[in-house]
Amino acid sequence: DVKVTQSSRYLVKRTGEKVFLECVQDMDHENMFWYRQDPGLGLRLIYFSYDVKMKEKGDIPEGYSVSREKKERFSLILESASTNQTSMYLCASSPGGVHTGELFFGEGSRLTVL
Amino acid sequence: GEDVEQSLFLSVREGDSSVINCTYTDSSSTYLYWYKQEPGAGLQLLTYIFSNMDMKQDQRLTVLLNKKDKHLSLRIADTQTGDSAIYFCAARNAGNNRKLIWGLGTSLAVNP
C-alpha cells in the first residue's frame, strides 16, 4: 500500500518561529502536494511539485515555501509563522499521467501558532 | 473561475441509501473524483469517473455523471455507521491537469 507519512501530527509554535513540515512517500510518485484545510474553506493548495527540485505555486503560496531535494520527500516551510497559519496541513502524492488526480494523503499535521 | 459545489450536510438512517450531489462549472473537466475523510484522518480516494462515462459502479458505490448538466452524484447503498465521514468531490481539467478543483465537502451522518 502507498504510504504518505507526515513528520508530526501536532505542533505548537510561537509567532515568528520557522516551522518545517516534512512529508515522505514510499511509492515513487512524481507529484507531491501541500494543502491546508480550514473549517468552511475546504482544501486549499499551497504548493505542489511534479519532479525533484521543481515546484509550482498553488492557490495560497504567500507565507510558505517548499523544498523537494529527493523524489520521496517534500517539505513545507513557514519562514516566520503567524497566527493565521494555524491550520491542518495535509500532504499528498500521486502518480503521473492519467493517474495524476489519484491522490494519496498523509494523516495531517495540525499546527497551532500562538 | 472553476468551481465545484456540494451541499454541506446529509443525514440518513443506517441501511438506507445515501446520495451525495456535486456540480462543477468547468466543462473541460476530464476526471471527477470522490474522496472520503474520516474524523482526524487524511483523505482517501473512493472512486473516480472519466468524463466520457455516465456511470461507474464499485461494490456499494455508484457514481453517476450528467455531463450536460455538469452534475455528479455518489450513491452509497446500504449505508453503515462506518460511512459517517466528509465526502469531497473534485474535478481535474485538461488544461492544468495537476491541480484538482475541490468542493467544500459533504458531511454525512448515519443514524442507527
Image: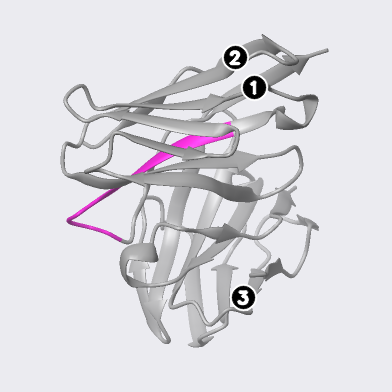
Asked if residue B94 lies in the magenta stretch, the reply is yes
The three-letter amino acid code for the residue at tag 3 is Gln
- Is A3 left, or right, of B62 in this rendering? right
Asked if residue B92 lies in the magenta stretch, the reply is yes
Label 2 in the same subunit as label 1: yes
For mark 1, name the chain: B
The three-letter amino acid code for the residue at tag 2 is Leu
For mark 3, name the chain: A
Q: Nearer the viewer, residue A73 or B23?
A: B23
Give the alpha-carbon distance from disc 3 to disc 2, as whole Å: 33 Å
Magenta segment's dominant SS is strand
Check the image and report above or below for A66 versus B85: below
Please state the horizontal and vertical placement of residue B8, each as a whole percent of the image: 53, 18
Check the image and report above or below for B93 versus A78: above
Residue topped by disc 2: B10
- Tell me the residue at 36%/50% (across/down): B100
Label 1 in the same subunit as label 3: no
Check the image and report above or below for B75 versus B92: above
For mark 2, name the chain: B
Give the alpha-carbon distance from disc 1 to disc 3, as whole Å: 29 Å
Please state the horizontal and vertical placement of residue B62, each as a whole percent of the image: 48, 31
Q: Nearer the viewer, residue A40 or A71?
A: A71
- Tell me the residue at 53%/82% (across/down): A28
Instruction: Identify the magenta region.
Output: B87-97
Q: Nearer the viewer, residue B35 or B73?
A: B73
Q: Nearer the viewer, residue A42 or A15?
A: A42
Residue topped by disc 1: B108
Which SS class for mark 2? strand
Check the image and report above or below for B36 versus A20: above
- Is B86 left, or right, of A42 in this rendering? right
Give the alpha-carbon distance from disc 2 to disc 1, as whole Å: 5 Å
Neighbour tally class for label 3: few under 14, some 14-19, many 20 plus, Cα within 10 Å: many
